[in-house]
Amino acid sequence: MRLKRFLKDNIVARYLPAVSKMDITYIFCDDAYLLQINQDFLRHDTYTDIITFDLSEEAQHLQAEIYISVTRIAENAQQFNTSYERELHRVIFHGLLHLCGFKDKTKKDAALMRGGEEECLTQYFDNEA
């Protein structure tokens, strides 16, 4: 419940102030499943840690499906010398930041995305109650 409140109060309220209702479904899967989604829907033949589908039809109602590879989260956590929990939260924040308009295809956009992720991680973990 704390995470949902954080997502709504700290990210959505800041970047999408018109949103009054939020329905986001998180689907946790393995690499093979997410690769198939990536191939079928985005025509990308690469592994990824997250895919976000914005299903919103109204500005006031944020709706989305966010697919997260738990396999990739574990590998990334090890590669970047961080905890599984912290890496999982980074990816959750990443998906929501995409819904808020953040991009990550260019170096400049990726740097802004990383900054947003780090800010969220700091706020979330430093204010743990």
Image (spheres, rainbow, N blue to C red):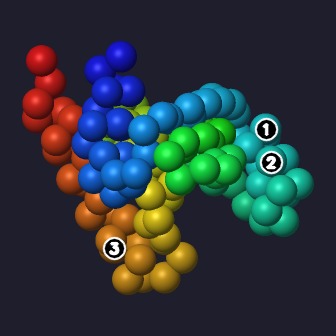
Q: Residue tagged by mark 1?
A: 33
Q: CA distance from mark 3 to mark 1?
A: 28 Å
**76 or 38: nearer the eye?**
38
Quadrant in which the N terminus is drawn: top left
Find residue 37 and name its label.
2
Residue 24, compared with residue 45, is above or below; it is: above
From the viewer's perspective, tell me whether residue 75 is left or right of residue 58. Answer: left
* Badge 2 vs badge 1, beta-carbon distance below 8 Å: yes
Mark 3 residue crowding within 10 angstroms, few (<14) / some (14–19) / many (20+) = some
Find residue 111 and name its label.
3
Q: Can residue 81 be seen in this snapshot? A: no
What amino acid is labelled 1 in the image? Tyr
Q: CA distance from mark 2 to mark 3?
A: 26 Å
Q: Can residue 21 be seen in this snapshot? A: yes
Q: CA distance from mark 2 to mark 1?
A: 6 Å
Q: Position of residue 87 (x, y in %)?
A: 39, 40
